[in-house]
Image: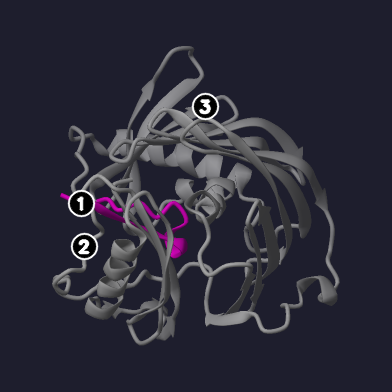
Amino acid sequence: MNRLVSFSAVLMLGLSVSGLRTGPATDKSDRAAAEELLRQAHDLTDIRAEGSAPFRLVARLLVYDAKGQVAEGSYAEIWKTPTSWRRETSYPGFWEARVAAGDTMYISRSQSGPPLDIFELPGLLHLSDSLEITAESSARNLREVGNPSARSLELTRRGKVWAEAYLNASVPLLERIRFHKYQYEFQFEKYKEFEHLRYPTVFTRFSHGKISLRVEVQQLVAETPDDSALAPLKDALALPWCPNPAPAKLEGITVLPAGAVPGNPRDRLVIYGIIGTNGRWHDMTVVSSTGDERAAKRFAQGIQDSQRYTPATCGNRRVAEERVLVANP
């Protein structure tokens, strides 16, 4: 049976939490201690918070395939405020520029859908987002692991454990996050000081125990950009957007048309699409498939035709949401 997983751009680390195990009950003092440590680590590393100093970041990307072969790319970010920035990613066979301008996101790219590792790149670089305590997220089960300053804790969302974080409590800084269900792990190393904060200069993503992406920060400097640096490119796709929307929600049960199957149940399939403000998919494309390409396209078309969503929102305003669907991750 094919297993379909959704990765959402609006959730940054956007991993589905349904079906994850719940840990043992913990008392209020344990939860308070875990959340306080998480808040301290968040505040110390959130270089993109409202009121933070504008900056320019340049990084080298190393993307590994299933055989361990590596392709090199680059990433550049110009950041002014949470709603005014530009990010440009270059990778063999793919290029993309994103510009946030108030309530609109402008996207220019060389092909219709980004590779999965590139799509997940913001989730890796925005490590502070995974440390944020919200109405639906919390932390618990704080414990010492190894040396006296090493701590681990469980991250929960809607009462269910979705990941485990490991921190250096003496600073405190996040060192790695493990996503149990999907066998992913993010590691953060070689922190440097930046405007009274700390930020890693090496980010690594592991999938099923193997390295899949490594980011090496080459430059991080305080710099106020001029307006021309934040101007969208001509003919860029414009999407209604905000930094932290409530995600789109699937309505009902997906019933695919006859013949809309991705092929061999073991085939790995990656599909990119946008859930518009009308709750319908658009710009859906097959990014990669290990099986029959025609079957993959029929499956993607079946998803697009059959699924309906309550759109993502920012307050009372509807916004678009990008997602990547993965069969057999």
Tell me the crowding category of disc 1: few under 14, some 14 to 19, or many 20 or more residues within 10 angstroms, Cα based. some
Which picture quadrant has residue 202? top right
Q: Mark 2 or mark 1: name the one nearer the start of the chain.
A: 1
Q: Would you say residue 62 sits in the magenta stretch?
A: no
Mark 3 or 2, which is nearer the eye?
Answer: 2
Q: Residues within 10 Å of mark 3 (few under 14, many from 20)?
A: some
* Amino acid under disc 3: Ala
Q: From this viewpoint, is residue 103 visible?
A: no
Check contact, mark 2 vs mark 1: CB within 8 A: yes
Q: Amino acid at mark 1?
A: Asn
The amino acid type found where label 2 is placed reads: Val
* Residue 6 magenta-highlighted: yes
* Image position of 10 (left or right of 307): right
Sequence-first tag of 1 and 3: 1
For marks 3 and 2 on the same chain, the one whose residue lies earlier in the sequence: 3
Horizontal relation, residue 75 to residue 119: left or right: right
Q: Nearer the viewer, residue 209 or 154?
A: 209
- Which label belongs to residue 2? 1
Numbered range of the magenta stretch? 1-17
Where disc 1 sits, the SS reads loop
Q: Is residue 29 left or right of residue 108?
A: left
Tag of residue 169: 3
> Above or below — where is 218 with respect to 244?
above
How far is mark 2 from mark 1, CA to CA? 9 Å
Return the mark for residue 31: none
Q: Position of residue 179 (x, y in %)?
A: 36, 39
Q: Which residue is mark 2?
A: 261
Residue placed most toward the observer, 273 or 32: 273
Image point (68%, 55%), residue name: 90
Q: Residue at x 67, y 40 (%)?
A: 199
Number of dots carrying numbers = 3
Which residue is pictured at 53% across the width and 60% down the height? 114
